[in-house]
Amino acid sequence: MRMRLDTLFGRLFGVLLLAIVLAHLLAFAWFFYYGPPPPPGPPPESSRPIEGGQGSAPPTDRPLRPRFGGPVVPLTFQLVFLIVAAWYGAKLLTRPIQRLSEAAERLSENLDSQPLDASGPREARQAAHTFNLMQQRIREQVQQRSRMLGAVSHDLRTPLSRLKLRLEQIDDPKLQNQMRQDLDDMIGMLDATLSYLHEQRTSEALQWMDVQALAESLSENAQDQGADVQVSGACAPLLVQPMALRSCINNLIDNALRYAGHASIVLEDQRHQLLIRVIDHGPGIAADKREAVFEPFFRLEGSRNRNSGGVGLGMTIAREAAERLGGQLSLEETPGGGLTAVIGLPRR
């Protein structure tokens, strides 16, 4: 099998081979110039002792041995060369994996992120090409699904509207109210589905935002509509996607108002993150159901059900918005009863 130098194996093998050859050449040169002297021969006539005197030492052309002679220096050269080759080889191996990992992280945050640069060894170029092709296919599938669901949701509005008009011809008031409630639920689910799809397609740039001002603005808007929403705490500006953060907090406020009739927003600024708590004192959610409520269209029985006005997408939208911001959303029990939604956003 012919080795190609544009492959990762070829480059790594070439670096190690070059390091080994250079290290051995240096070792041979060292021993050649500073090796042990040859065994002494018979002294020449001129150097024989005369009348009890001492003769002079025979001249030699070999350089004097250094202070640190022997194998220490050449072995040190070999060790240094091999360490450098191992470091560079490890860098060659990990660089494509690191680039692929960074691209995958960007893709998890934004499907429209920049494609991976197809450069480097052949294996890295092939991996980059495959990754970019996968990203394109995922984006096309998501867009196709959104278009299909959006078209279905939009086209269903017309027959539903006709059904609402025909309800007026039913003489039974009880049956009329029941059918009207069912139609309102269906229209509400369609609206929530379109909103959910819009949230998934939306891609924003990061901007510095006054989160405290946003929370106070949402509180004032709710109070103008007669709702009880209070804000406490303070925080410094944060680098976020404004629409995603607004959608996250707004959905949590709507959820608290729907089931408890009031909400409290508490801001807690920490060194590495910002905590936003949306607190209510309503019926709460059992501990074993708190993760399930983040599933699309999941509904709880009892006080938190369809009769309360929701369709099961608000918490899903809120969590996905928090994750797009690089944070997380969790649910806790409010001391004294109720539900507390905790948004943790990192400071970049």
Image (cartoon, grey):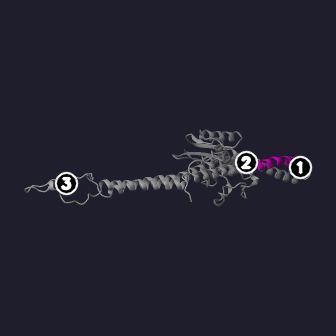
Q: Secondary structure at mark 2?
A: helix
* Crowding at mark 3 (Cα within 10 Å: few <14, some 14-19, many 20+): few
Q: Residue at x 80, y 46 (%)?
A: 154
- Judged left or right of residue 165, residue 145 is left
Residue count near mark 2 (Cα–Cα under 10 Å), binned few <14, some 14–19, many ≥20: some
Q: Are marks 2 and 3 in contact (CB under 8 Å)?
A: no
Crowdedness near tag 1: few (<14), some (14–19) or many (≥20) residues, C-alpha within 10 Å: some
Residue 291 or residue 44, whichever sits in front: 44
Tell me whether the residue at label 1 lies in contact with that at label 2, contact meaning CB atoms closer than 8 angstroms.
no
Which mark lies nearer to you, 1 or 3? 3
Q: Disc 2 marks which residue?
A: 143
Q: Earlier in the sequence, mark 1 or mark 3?
A: 3
Residue, far front? 45
User: In which quadrant is the N terminus drawn?
Assistant: bottom right
Dot in front, 2 or 3: 3
Compute the Cα span from label 2 to label 3. Answer: 91 Å
Q: Please report the residue visible at 54 percent of the width from the left and 54 percent of the height from the top.
A: 8
In the rendered structure, find residue 167 and report the number of the disc placed on it.
Answer: 1
Q: Is residue 79 visible?
A: no
- The numbered dot on residue 158 is none
Extent of the magenta region: 146-162
Query: In the rendering, at what x and y percent does residue 103 appear?
Result: 60, 49
Q: Residue at x 11, y 56 (%)?
A: 49
On screen, residue 169 versus residue 276, left or right, reads right
Which residue is tagged 3?
A: 58
In which quadrant will I find the C terminus?
Answer: top right
CA distance separating discs 1 and 2: 36 Å
Determine whether the residue tagged by mark 3 lies in a helix, strand or loop.
loop
Kindly identify the amino acid type of the residue bearing the numbered disc 3.
Answer: Pro
Q: Earlier in the sequence, mark 2 or mark 3?
A: 3
- Which residue: 58% across, 52% down? 122
